[in-house]
Structure formats: C-alpha cells, structure tokens
Amino acid sequence: MRAMNLPEFTAAALAERFSLQLQGDGDTLVRGVATLASAGPGQLAFLANPRYRGQLATTGAAVVVVRADDAGAVRGTALIARDPYVAFARISALFEQVPAREPGIHPSAVVDPTAEVSPDAHIGPFVSIGARSKVAPGCVIGPGCVIGDDCELGEGCELQARVTLYTRVRLGKRVRILPGAVLGGAGFGLAMDAGHWVNVPQLGGVVVGDDCEIGANSCIDRGALDDTVLEEDVRIDNLVQIGHNVRIGAHTAMAGCSAAAGSAKIGRYCLVGGGAGILGHLEVVDKVLVTAMSLVTHSIREPGEYSSGTPLTDNRTWRKNAARFKQLDALARRVNASTQGSFE
C-alpha cells in the first residue's frame, strides 16, 4: 500500500505549474521520478541527451518530459519543455523529502552571549556560535557546526553537519553548505625571511552572495586584506579549494577537486571542470568553460572553451611521446631555420 504522505500530481497539474505543454492524458498520476531505464508506473522521467532517445520506446514511465522534436516518439503522456533537464529538476524537487526542522536551540549547543540568533532559526546539537555572530530567521544549523566570531548568516541559510565558518564570514540569503566545508580559514600567505617562513596575517573575510551552494569538504580561505568573494548563485562542488582574495562571478560553477589560487578573478557564467586549476592573480572573463583537468596558466581575455594537457592514450605511446616533448624546442628551431633559409 502506498504511504499516505507521498505527494502525487496529475500531468495536467504539472504542466500548468511549470508552464509546459501537455500531450496525452492529463489525468495521469505522477508519484515520483526516475530515469527512463528504471521508471515504472506512476513515475516521471525525462530525455535530455539524444543518446538515450531509443529508451523512449521501452520506458515504463507514466510521463516523460521531452523537447518538442521528441514528443512524437513518446507512447504515453508527455510534457514538452524547452529544456527537459531544467523542467525535470523543478518537478523532482516536489518529491524531495526534507525533514522538518523545528525552531529553537538544542540544549547541547553553545552560543556566546553577544551572538544574535533568531528565534525562528534551528540550531542543532553540539553547535558552537561565537561572539557577535548573527543568525537570521529561517536558518538551519546542523549538528556539530562551528560558527566563529563576527559571522553573519542571511535568511534561510542551511549549514549541514560539521560545517565551519571560522571568522568574518558573511553569507547572503538561502546559502546552502554541505557537510565538512570550511569557510574563513587562514589563506596561504607566507613570506620567506632568512630561510624560514613567516605567516602573513589574514585580516580579511569571506563574503558569499545569495543562493550559493558549497559542496562537502570544500575550503574557501579568508582574504589577506580584502575579502574573498563569491557573488550570487555560485555553485561549488565537493573538495574544491578557493584561495584567499579570489573573486568568483555570479552563476559560475566549479566541479569537484578544482581549485583557484590566491587573488584569481573568475567571471560570471563560467564553468570550471573537475580537477582543473587556475593560477593565482589571473583573470578569467565571463562565459569561459575550462575543461576537466586543465591548468590555466595565463589570463583568459575572450569567452570560449579552453583545455590543456595531452589526450589519454596507452602508457607505451605516452612514454614515447613524453620523450619527444624534450625535443620539440630543438625541432622547432631547425624547422624555423630551414624555413627562413628557403626564402634567402
């Protein structure tokens, strides 16, 4: 028997709610979402990648979200969208089971007397909130989180388990931070003196705009003098390193294990692939895509797609090519000399 608290929607209701075109039976019920390959009765699936178009003929989904060009291949009910993946993301959010968080402060939490915590916020077990910090209404602070001194959280922020805001971290509204992330730790500022490192004090903070999301175990260092800044709607994946005084433009996304070194400036609507790196003090303009595992070694002045490195090949071939890399300069000089000589 189906659980009574599971949501369900008719295809017609979904079409109206998300401004989609309905094809087929509007009374078809949707009680969940799945992939084309695994969907069954009462579930909604989507087709965004044309490589999976053949699965339209065999899917058991009750409703499929497709582009207009693919609607004719759907056997049952379809919802037609300009971007099926975006439509699916919005529909699937209706079925996400989010546990209720009652407002209040757990008895095991420790809150400095000078901190300001909204009565509407949820403060979980073993949370620590430091001096002069502010937590706005609607915030959810998960178990084991540490909010240091002089931090500010805007309305509706969510800090999941074991998040650390070290000091001088300011979050906009609806910022979501996944477990283990650390914001506001000391940036990697060092000066060499007589053979020994001297730490450069990191006196800035971290500013995160509205609607940003920061993945698990990612680190965003506070600035040395000015702040490290993420503008609105920036998305940071898991295990990402953001150095001190980096600035990331609005709507940019960085995939897992990527990194931006100190004082780099990344534009708006950029995409940085997994494992990619951006060296310090470089500038990347708006709408740049850096492919996975690439290393940005100079500023990028024009929008577009950029890659570095060599393609994957078998190890024996790679070793041969690697040995030849050392010869490229000499070869180029010989070619250049012979080309110049041909015109004499």
Image (cartoon, rainbow, N blue to C red):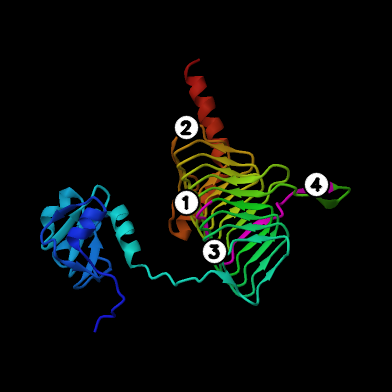
Q: Give the residue number, with chain letter if any, for mark 1.
A: 273
Q: Position of residue 83 (x, y in %)?
A: 27, 49
Q: Which badge, 3 or 1, is on the more N-terminal residue?
A: 3
Report the span colored magenta: 173-192
204 is higher (above) or lower (below) than 153: above
> At label 2, which amino acid type do we have?
Glu
Please tell me whether mark 1 sits on a helix, a strand or a loop. Answer: loop
Asked if the residue under mark 1 is in contact with the one under mark 4, i.e. CB atoms within 8 Å, the reply is: no
Gap in angstroms between the C-alphas marked 4 and 3 = 45 Å
Q: Give the residue number, with chain letter if any, for mark 3.
A: 120
Q: Which badge, 4 or 1, is on the more N-terminal residue?
A: 4
> At label 4, which amino acid type do we have?
Ala
Which residue is rendered at x = 25% and y = 81% of the image?
2
Q: Residues within 10 Å of mark 2 (few under 14, many from 20)?
A: few
Asked if the residue under mark 1 is in contact with the one under mark 3, i.e. CB atoms within 8 Å, the reply is: no
Q: Give the residue number, with chain letter if any, for mark 4.
A: 191
Q: Residue furthest top?
A: 344
Gap in angstroms between the C-alphas marked 4 and 2 = 34 Å
